[in-house]
Amino acid sequence: MALSKARIIAAAVALLVVGAGALLWHPAIAPVDTHAVFSHEQVARGAELAAIGDCSVCHTATNGQPFAGGRGVPTPFGTVYATNITPDPETGIGRWSEAAFKRAMRDGIDRAGHHLYPVLPYPHFTRATDADIAAMYAFLMTRPAAHATAPLNQLPFPLNQRFVLAGWNLLYLSPGPWHPDPAHDAAWNRGNYLVEAIGHCGACHTPHNALGAESSGQTLAGGQAENWYAPPLQSASPAVRPWTQATLADYLRTGFEAHHGAAAGPMTAVTDELAGVPDSDIQAIATYIASMMPKTAPEPVMARAGGDPHAAAIFAGACAGCHGSDAPMTRAGAPSLALSTVVNAPTPQGAIQMILNGIPWREGKSAPYMPSFGAVLTDAQVADLASYLRATYSEKPAWTDVPAEVAKARGSS
Amino acid sequence: MTAVLSRRTLLAAGGGLVVAFSLHAQEPKRPGSLKETPSLDAWIRVAPDGRVTVFTGKAELGQGLTTALLQIAAEQLDVAPNRIELITADTMRTPNEGFTAGSHSMQDSGTAILNAAAQVRGLLCDAAAAEFGVAADTLTTADGLVHAADGRAIGYGELAAKLNLHVDATANSPLKDPAAYRLMGTPMQRIDIPAKLTGGASYVQDLRLPGMLHARVVRQPSYGATLLDFDTGPIEHMPGVVKVVRDGSYLAVVATKEWQAIKAMRALAAAAKWQETASLPDEATILDTLQALPVKDIPVLTWQAQAGAPVKRLKARYSRPYLMHGAIGPSCSVAQFVDGTMTVWTHTQGVFPLRAALASLLRLPPDKVHCIHTQGSGCYGHNGADDVAGDAVLIARAVPGHPIRVQWMREDEHTNEPYGSAMIAEVEGAIDADGRIVDWDYAVWSNTHNRRPNIGGLMLQNAALSDKLPVPPPAPIPMPEGGGDRNSNPIYALPNARVVYHFIPQMPVRISALRSLGAYLNVFAIESFMDELAEAARADPVEFRLRHLQDERAKAVISLAAEKFGWSAGKRGDGRGFAFARYKNLAAYCAIALTLGVDHETGQIRLGRVVAAVDSGQPVNPDGIRLQIEGAIIQSASWTLYEQVHFDRKRITSFDWSRYPILRFPAAPDSIDVYIVPRPGLPFLGTGEAGQGPTSAAIANALKDAAGVRLRQIPLSAPAVKTAIGV
Amino acid sequence: MIRLNVNGHDHDVDAEPDTPLLYVLRDDLALNGAKFGCGLGQCGACTVMVDGRAVFSCLTPIALLPGRNVRTIEGLGMNAVQQAFVEEQAAQCGYCIAGMVMRAQALLEHNPNPSEQEIRDQMAVNLCRCGTHMRILAAVRRAAGRGVKS
Ligand code: FES
Ligand code: FES
C-alpha cells in the first residue's frame, strides 16, 4: 500500500499534536557497571528466544559482527538502522540494567529515556514474560562486545522527532502481559505466545495501517516485508496444499517443505534462525499457526498447456531446468510451481520478487537456492513470465497490474 | 657384483635367486618413465627444420604440467620453448605412462623428459663433433644450434636427420649443472592460459567435428535401478532426435543439436519408469556402519624401541564423509566409430587403461580403440571422465560414422561420479614426562581408493547394460603409496608405533580416487592429534613437531612456514593453527600456518591469513608450484568446512551445487602466501596433492585455538562448530 | 530464425526460441568461451554480458534477446581484464575462467573501483573448483587499478 507523502506528513503532524499533548517524560535509568553472573541455562534459553525473536536478523549488518547493529531496515517511512545490542559500554547496551532492557522491550523507551521506533517490535515484546526478557538480556550481555555505532536513521521530518512516538504508542501500544486461552491446549498456547510475544510474526504477516502499525482485527492476515509478499498465516492462506502442523514444522526448521517450497526473501533469515531452536518450540509455533490455517483447499492443477508462447519459451529456457516436471530438482522432491504460494497468492509481488532476486546462497549451507533473473529480464519480460506462471500453474484469476508491480519491485530491488 | 646387494634383496630373493637379482641390481635403473619406455624417440623427435616434438604419456589436468615439461625439455635441449611442440597422452602416439595421478607426473614423465632431453642433446653434440672433427666436450649448444669453439655452428635439424634416436636411453644422462639453469626453476607463464582467456578451443567440450551429433544419457536414478518397459516413440519424434539408444537399463538419446538432445533427455527421464531398491545405509550412522563392515587387516608398520615412561595417554577418533570431486565442467567425451575402429577424445587421467576398459566394454580388441587425451575441466581424481567416454563409445557404436559428443548434466556428475571414501581413524598416543611421544597406536578404516577402470566391468554403464561383464573385487593400493592408508605412517620419529589399515571391501556408495586419497584424513588425524599431544605436553605445536622429526627437509619446511607466518611460541588464542605433512612420505613436503575467526553465534569459520612452505625438490615452474598449493589449500578448506555427500536410503540427494555447496569467493582466505624451499638438482617431488592434508588439520588446530573446541569430524560445519561452542 | 547481436555482429540463428543462449553461442556460432557448468544458474561458467550486465547464458533463452547486445569473451580481444588474468596466472584448469572474466568485466564497467568486499560479493556467483580464487581476486584488483573500458 503506497502512502502519499502528503498523507504521511498530515498524519505526522496530527501525531505531533497528540504527542505533544500527551508527552510523557521518561527518566533515564541509571547506567550500571557490573552485571549479575548469569546461569548457563538462562543464557541458553535466551539464545533460543533470541533466535525465535530474530534479534540478529535486524541487529547484524551484512558481514558484520552479530548484534553489533548497523543494518538498515527499510520501512515505508524511511530507513531505520538497528542499533548495537552487544554489551559494549559506549556504543552497545553494556551499561543497561535489566530494568532498562525490560523497559525497551516492553515500552520502546531506551535507557536514556528516548523513544525507540516500532521497527523494534516492542508492541509484541511487551507481552513477553519477565523470565524470557531476563533470559534474552542474559544472552545479549554474554555476547562479545563490539564497538560500533549505527548510522543515523533516514527519516523525514517530523518522523525524525522521536517524541512523536509517544503519540503513536498511545494509539498502538497496548501494554500488558500475554494471557493463555483456556480453550486451547498447552502446545497451542505456547505457540500463540511465541508467535505473538517473541516471534512477532505479525510484524510482517499482518497488514499495516497508514501509520505503520499492525491493523487491528487483521492479525496475520498477510502483509509485506521489504517489498516481499508475506502470506496470510490464517484462513486466507493461499497455499494450495493446506499447511499442517507437521509441514509447517518442517518448513520452519529447514526453510523448505516438499509441498510448498522454499523460504525466500526476508523469511530465509527467519528459518535460518529457527534451525537452532528446540523442536518443542517449533512444534508449538506450528501447532498454533496450523490451527488458524484452512483445512481444505482445492487440488492443484499440475500445469496447463498453452499460454503466451513467448513466455512459454522463456519458461522453457530459463526456468524448466529446475521447475520442469522432469527436472532434477523436481525429481529430488521440490514441488511443482502449481503448489507454490507465490504463484497462488492474491498479488504478483512474491512471484516478481522471486524472479528478480531468487534465493541467494548461504555460504557452505546445503539449502534451497535460486538464481536471480533481474539482470537478464526486462520489466516487460518479468511481467510476461509472472503472468504466464499464474495462468499455467494456478486456477486463481489472473493478476491485474503486473507491470506496475514489476516497476515497483525494480525500484526497490 | 656383491657390492650392491642389500640386506633386503638377500632376504627377498633368497637362495638361488641371489645371483640373478644381484646381476639385475648391478645395472642402475633408468630414471622416471624411461624404465618402461626406454627408446629416446618415444619421448623426443627433432624434425629436419629443427622443430622439436616432445611426447608425454601424462595429461594436462589444469596443473600446468605441459608448461613444466616444456621448461624441462627446453632447458636440457637448449631450444626455445616456443620451438617445441608437446604431445600429451594418446594411445597411438605417446608412451604409456599409466595414469596422470598421485602427483606422479613430474617424478615419472618430468624425469623421463629431463633425462631423454639431456641424452638427445648429448647425441646431437656427438654428431656435431663428428661433423666438425672436434672433441664433443669443446662444443656448446644454444637455441637449437651446436656451436664449435671456432665459430662454426650447425642446426639440430640437420644433425638429427643423420641421427638415429630410436635407441634406448642409458641410465645416466649428461645433465646440465643446475646452477646453469635458465628456465628450470624460473617462473614461466603457462602456455595454455591465453587460449583459455580468449575463447580458444581448449577442452574436449569445445570439439566440433563435421557431422557431430549430441547425445545425453538418462542415468539410473539409484544403484541397481531397473528400467521398466515404456514407449519411447513420442521422444523419437521430437525435433532433431536421431535415435533413442536403449540396452537393458541403459538409456540415451542422440539429436542433431545439443538443446534438442537435452529436451529429449528430459522427456525420456519423465517417461521412464524405474524399479528401485533402498540399497543405501542410513546417512546419519554411516561411519558406524562402515566401521562394522567386515575388514581385511593390513599392517602398515610396527616400531618398537626403548622409551620413557608414559605419563599421559590420549585417544581420539577422526572421520571424513564421502566427498565429491565436483568438477566445474561436467564430464564430456566425443567418440566416432568408423570401419570397426573407435576413436575417443577424452579427458581421462589414463588413456591406456581407459582404452582397455572401453575395448572390453565394446568387446573390441584394444588396437581398435584409440584414446586421445583432450583437456577437460579439472578432475581431481577419478571423476566422471572415464564413464562419459563409456557413454560416448556405446552411443557412437549405435550411430556409426558420426562423431558423438556426450556431456553429462550437472546432476549426472554430482550423483554418478565415484566419490572419495568416507573414512575413520582412531589414534591413541602417550607422552612421557619430557613431553616426548613414547607410544602411538593408529588404525584407519576405509574403502578402496582406486576403482579406475581398466576393464569394462568397472565402467558405470556395466551396471545398466543387459549383458554385464564381471566386476572385479575392490583392492587396496599397497604401501608405500597406499590408498586408505596413504600417509597413515607418521613421518615423526616415534619409538613405539603400530599402524594398521582396516580395509573395507564392501562399498555401500560407489567410490574411487579423490585427490590425495586417504592422506587427507590421515594427515588430518595425525596433525590434529599432534596438536592434542602438544597441548597435553604444554608444548608449542611447531616446536613439538620439530622435536619429533629427524628429516632435515621436513624441519626446514616447518621452520620456513613458521618464520614467514611469524609464529611465536606461546602466543595463543588468536585463532592460529599449524600442520605439516610430506605427501605419501615420498613426495613434496608442505607446512601450513593459518589464522581463522569464528562467528560465535553461527559457528561459521572465516579463514584469514594462510602461509605455506613447500619443498618439491628441484622446482621447475615455481609459480606453478605456488598455484598448486594455493589450489590445494582452497579446495581442502572447502572439503574441510562444508562438504559432505548426502543420500537417502535409495538415492544420492546431493544433486547440484545447492545440495553440495563448495567454497565461494567471500569465504576465500584473506591471503595465501606460498614459499618454496629450492632444492637445486634434487629429484622432482610431486606437489599437486601436498596441501590437502595439512590444510584440514591447520584449520582444526586453529579452530581449537580460536574457540577452544576440538572438532574431529569433517566437515567442520557451522552447525557442528556452533554445537561445540555452545551459547 | 532469430536475429542476435553478438559482439557487435548480427547473426540470424536457426534455433528454437527457448534455446538457451549458451548452446547457440557454442554450437551455432562456434564460440568456445561460455561453458556449460550446471545449466542451473549456480556456477557462472556460462557467464556472458547482455546489455552490459553479467548473465547466465545457460538460463537465457534467445527469445529474450532480439534487439539486445550480447558480449562474450571472444569480443573482448585481449583487454585489461584478460591481461590481468594472464599476469596473475589466474587459471588452473581454466574451465571457470571465461565466466570469471566476463563477470569481472561487468563488475568493473559498473564499478571501476570496487572494494575487496564488493569484488568478492560480485564474484561469489561464479564457482572455481581448482581453488584459483586468490589469483582471480588479484587479477580483478589489478584490472580495476588500470581502468576497464566498456
Ligand atoms: S552453466 Fe550457467 S550458471 Fe552454471
Ligand atoms: S581454474 Fe579450474 S575450475 Fe577454476
Image (cartoon, coloured by chain):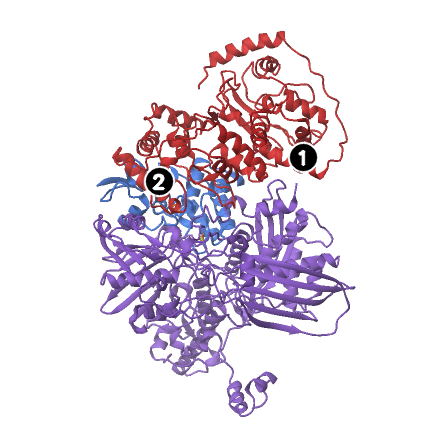
- Which corner quadrant of the image does residue B57 belong to? bottom left
Q: Is residue A42 above or below residue B470?
A: above
Rendered image: mark on residue B609: none
- Mark before the other along the chain sequence, 1 or 2: 1
Q: Foreground: B232 or B459?
A: B232
- Kindly indicate which chain is depicted in blue in the rendered structure: C
Q: Quadrant of the image for the N terminus of chain B?
A: bottom right
Contact (CB < 8 A) between labels 1 and 2? Answer: no
Which of the chains is purple? B
Above or below residue A347? Residue B677 is: below
Amino acid at pointer 1 = Phe
**Chain ID for label 1?**
A
* Residue bearing the label numbered 2: A319
Q: Could you say whether the residue bearing mark 2 is in a helix, strand or loop? A: helix
Report the chain shown in red.
A
* Quadrant location of the C terminus of chain B in the rendered image: top right
Q: Which mark is in front, 1 or 2?
A: 1
Q: Camera-side residue: B668 or A53? A: A53
